[in-house]
Image (cartoon, rainbow, N blue to C red):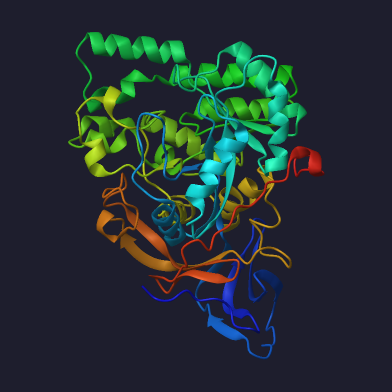
């Protein structure tokens, strides 16, 4: 592997590219000094000792902020196969320079202990990282414990309406944690599926002997997601808590959030490439194991409905929900109840969205930057340090070749899974180079990152000043 490459004393001058922001596109140079963007403008003069990088024909994007990843995931039942070094390097090949991952509070742990464990694991990362706190053990009457999270640099918590008994929170628990989170300036990210509906449907399939991968989609009906989303929005509104609905897989889910926001509620919704590009007919094919995730893939009509809401600006973020389980873990047993759920996706999300979002005419390059970089950074208190290409922002950027044409193949990827759910899909565009705080992580398609060069980024809480939705 090539040696890590940092900016020369005079910095870097990215010359001749097309700058893309969440609002516009324009031809300009970009000057990087001491890890930050120094200036953006036409024909910037080179300073003494500066290194000039030719970006002719390339788009210059802010680094992607993937606000929902599971690098080196440990659910207490399954463990993903990637290390933080492997996971972060793969992400850098997808133009991702910052992730918001998860610190899980396992039973009996304090939030400080949960975070310390994840910080130790992430210390080998090549990209920057922040964390949501997955809250699982806050007994009634001890909600004040959430007050320590802003001091730890955490601005968001994760809650679940399913996965009994590990993560499940009943309605009373949801109300008190949502209320306390809002009181301490935190935003709550909620996985919404009605646990009773999922449990009953799964039990019926098991009783009928239908446990093969092909039945996974039937085990978690759309109604379970839509009902739980409606309920969580209602509960959050009742206690005045800001809320984010995780990985919407149906159009109605995203529409419910859009309606709540139109009525004045502080509510956001994310979706993922898998729900936009894949559908449940894949469970009828020869390799349904590739598509075991929660929520499952839906009917093609749901994908189209989601695309419509993305195009209309009613979806706030496109994230990956990346889980890098190996192929052999997925293939271990043809039983959806015993197969780890989650798909690898950090390395493929940007070219997929460039192809099936932009090239397909569903949104523009500024829309992509808004959905995949600026809005996640703003919502989670990272902006304008992240998600922006303006003086003073971290020099996190992607040099992207929009003219490239190719096909996604697992053999070309750097994720450890050994497979991709997007195998064989044509793509238009590729990441040429990725820089994090002015340091090349990928240069001309080659990895040049230093292990451990990424750093933990503290998120600003709602109490630290006005937020973009205020």
Whether 162 is drawn above or below 185: the answer is above
Q: Position of residue 34 (x, y in %)?
A: 67, 73
Give the image quarter of residue 347: bottom left
Left or right: 41 as drawn, with respect to 63: right
Left or right: 18 as drawn, with respect to 89: right
Q: How many dots with numbers?
A: 0
The quarter in which the N terminus is drawn is bottom left
Is there any visible trace of residue 262 in the rendered image? no
Left or right: 381 as drawn, with respect to 108: right
Camera-side residue of 404 and 39: 39
Camera-side residue of 456 and 376: 456
Whether 402 is drawn above or below 2: the answer is above
Is there any visible trace of residue 176 in the rendered image? yes
Q: Residue at x 27, y 34 (%)?
A: 282
Q: Residue at x 63, y 11 (%)?
A: 172
Q: Position of residue 301 (x, y in %)?
A: 41, 30
Q: Residue furthest bottom?
A: 48
Q: Position of residue 366 (x, y in %)?
A: 60, 56
Camera-side residue of 250 and 114: 114
Q: Position of residue 470 (x, y in %)?
A: 80, 39
Q: Residue at x 41, y 64 (%)?
A: 430
Q: Residue furthest right?
A: 465
């Amino acid at each position: 592997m090539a040696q890590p490459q940092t900016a020369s004393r005079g910095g870097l001058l990215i010359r001749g590219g097309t700058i893309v922001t969440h609002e516009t596109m324009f031809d300009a140079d970009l000057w990087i000094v001491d890890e930050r963007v120094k200036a953006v403008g036409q024909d910037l003069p080179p300073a003494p000792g500066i290194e000039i990088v030719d970006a002719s024909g390339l788009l210059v994007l802010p680094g992607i902020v993937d606000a929902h990843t599971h690098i080196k995931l440990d659910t207490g039942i399954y463990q993903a196969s990637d290390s933080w070094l492997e996971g972060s390097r793969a992400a850098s090949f997808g133009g991702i320079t910052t992730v918001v991952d998860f610190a899980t509070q396992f039973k009996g742990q304090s939030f400080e202990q949960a975070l310390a464990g994840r910080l130790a694991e992430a210390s080998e990362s090549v990209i920057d990282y922040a964390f949501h706190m997955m809250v699982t053990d806050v007994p009634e009457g001890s909600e004040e414990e959430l007050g320590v999270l802003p001091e730890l640099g955490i601005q968001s918590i994760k809650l679940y309406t399913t996965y009994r008994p590990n993560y499940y929170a009943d309605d009373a628990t949801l109300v008190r944690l949502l209320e306390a989170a809002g009181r301490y300036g935190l935003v709550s990210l909620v996985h919404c599926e009605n646990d009773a509906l999922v449990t009953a449907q799964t039990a019926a399939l098991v009783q009928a002997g239908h446990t093969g991968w092909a039945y996974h989609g039937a085990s978690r009906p759309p109604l379970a997601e839509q009902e739980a989303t409606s309920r969580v929005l209602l509960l959050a509104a009742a206690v005045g808590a800001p809320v984010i609905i995780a990985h919407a897989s149906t159009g109605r889910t995203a529409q419910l959030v859009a309606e709540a926001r139109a009525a004045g509620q502080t509510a956001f919704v994310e979706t993922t490439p898998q729900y936009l590009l894949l559908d449940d007919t894949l469970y009828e094919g020869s390799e349904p194991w590739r598509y075991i995730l929660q929520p499952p893939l839906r009917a093609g009509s749901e994908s189209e409905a989601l695309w419509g809401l993305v195009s209309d600006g009613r979806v706030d973020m496109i994230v990956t929900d990346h889980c890098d389980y190996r192929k052999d873990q997925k293939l271990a047993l043809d039983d959806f109840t015993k197969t780890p759920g989650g798909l690898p996706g950090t390395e493929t999300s940007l070219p997929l969205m460039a192809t099936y979002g932009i090239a397909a005419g569903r949104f523009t390059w500024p829309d992509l930057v808004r959905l995949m970089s600026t809005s996640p950074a703003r919502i989670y208190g990272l902006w304008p340090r992240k998600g922006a290409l303006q003086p003073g922002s971290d020099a996190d950027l992607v040099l992207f070749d929009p003219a490239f044409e190719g096909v996604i193949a697992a053999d070309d990827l750097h994720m450890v899974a050994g497979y991709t759910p997007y195998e064989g899909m044509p793509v238009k565009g590729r990441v040429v180079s990725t820089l994090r705080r002015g340091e090349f992580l990928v240069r001309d398609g080659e990895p040049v990152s230093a292990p451990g060069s990424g750093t933990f980024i503290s998120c600003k809480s709602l109490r630290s000043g006005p937020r973009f939705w205020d």
